[in-house]
Image: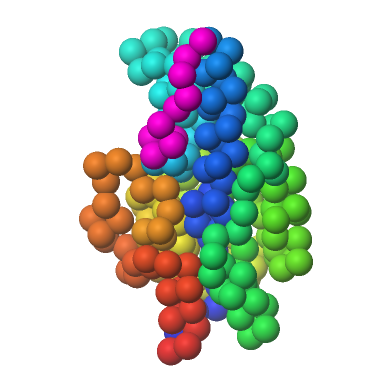
Amino acid sequence: MKGIELFAFDLDGTLLDTAPDFLYAVNVLRERYSLEEADSDQVRSRVSQGAASLASYALGLESESDEKIEFHRQELLDIYEDCCLKNTRVFDGIEDVLDKLNSTKIKWGIITNKPRRFAEVIVQDKLNKFKTPFLICPDDVGVRKPDPDGLNLALKVSESNPKNSIYIGDHKIDIKAGEQANMMTGAAAYGYIPMEDAAEEWQADFIFYHPRDINNLLDL
């Protein structure tokens, strides 16, 4: 679409399919506590909700204290750190999108809730050839989405007008963050949509059912 000067993306469930490595980590955690393998659909639907949600599901901690959940969240993240490059891959069609953005010199970058200790390693390994212009993590702004500070920083470092910029993600907190940053929003409906939720209900400006659909904004 003419006039869009910045395409900003979430990471997990938007650019990268990281669910297989989270499933592996959850199953390692469950095995430690003599539990059977996890339901892959349950894990996939929780990836964009964060490690606390995954740990709670993995060990049935929904009614436990915040302290106990945090202990097992850290346990899960330590496992994940050792396997985060094992099966993660770029979503089919994303390479086409990033190639086109680079070839047309349209600005783009990543704003994620993933801590930098994981995000930087994964982006360097899986997206290295695209020379990601910027990667903004909670470490950089001190807050997580739906707080818009990460998106506001992206607009600043890329010198972009929010009204001419779009943020694309696979969770309603991404859409909320984009709205609060006064950006256009795009729902990645192909990503890790929580169970009993629907991207169509988020009131995003655009809905993408396949990564290649994003190219439609570049072809207009």
Chosen colour scheme: rainbow
In this picture, is 170 found above or below 98? above
Residue 21 drawn at (x, y percent): 59, 39
Residue drawn where x is 67% and y is 24% of the image: 78
Quadrant including the C terminus: bottom left
Residue 124 drawn at (x, y percent): 75, 54
Residue 138 drawn at (x, y percent): 59, 41
Q: Residue furthest front?
A: 36
In this picture, is 202 found above or below 99? above
Residue 46 can be seen, yes or no: no
**Most common secondary structure along the magenta stretch:** loop
Residue drawn where x is 51% and y is 10% of the image: 34
Residue drawn where x is 59% and y is 75% of the image: 96
Magenta-drawn segment:
34-43
Assess whether residue 110 is covered by the magenta stretch.
Answer: no
Residue 204 drawn at (x, y percent): 32, 63
Residue 115 can be seen, yes or no: yes
